[in-house]
Amino acid sequence: MNGMLIVFLLLNLLSGIFVYLGYLIAFRNRRDLISGYREGEYKEPEKFGKLMGISLFFSAVINLAISIALVMHFEQSDLFARYGALIVAPPLIAALYGNIKYRH
């Protein structure tokens, strides 16, 4: 039971970080927070940054939904393991899409 509480708290902490980073990247143009980002490599860096920031918002929403599901089904500890990839998928897909579409 303590393990589930730790997972729940870590999921909510991760959601908060994703929301904050998504806000900074998408709306405050802090594209320097994206790992490996170089301004000259993208033909439309503003659109790439907005895409990455919004994908982090979407990832945070999925993360919060999974943490709510964990609370509702507290005894099923494998729920996070099955759906954990949904947390990571939106930013990765957005990075691949953005690199293909917006890179020179």
Image (cartoon, rainbow, N blue to C red):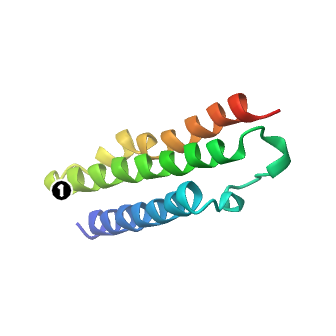
Quarter occupied by residue 64: bottom left
| 98 sits left or right of 51 in the view | right
Residue 74 vs residue 26, the one in the foreground: 26
| Residue at 77% in and 34% down | 103
Q: Quadrant of the N terminus?
A: bottom left
Image height check: is 77 above or below 103?
A: below
* Residue 2: image location, x then y, percent: 27, 70
| Residue at 71% in and 45% down | 45
* Residue 25: image location, x then y, percent: 59, 58
Judged from the image, the secondary structure of the residue bearing numbered disc 1 is loop
The three-letter amino acid code for the residue at tag 1 is Phe
Q: Quadrant of the C terminus?
A: top right
In the rendered image, the residue lying farthest to the left is: 72
Image height check: is 11 above or below 54?
A: below
| 4 sits left or right of 34 in the view | left
| 98 sits left or right of 68 in the view | right
| Residue at 22% in and 55% down | 68
| Residue pointed to by mark 1 | 74
For the image shown, how many numbered marks are present on the structure?
1
Image height check: is 80 above or below 19?
A: above
Quarter occupied by residue 5: bottom left
* Residue 59: image location, x then y, percent: 43, 48
Residue 35 vs residue 84, the one in the foreground: 35
* Residue 51: image location, x then y, percent: 56, 43
Quarter occupied by residue 93: top right
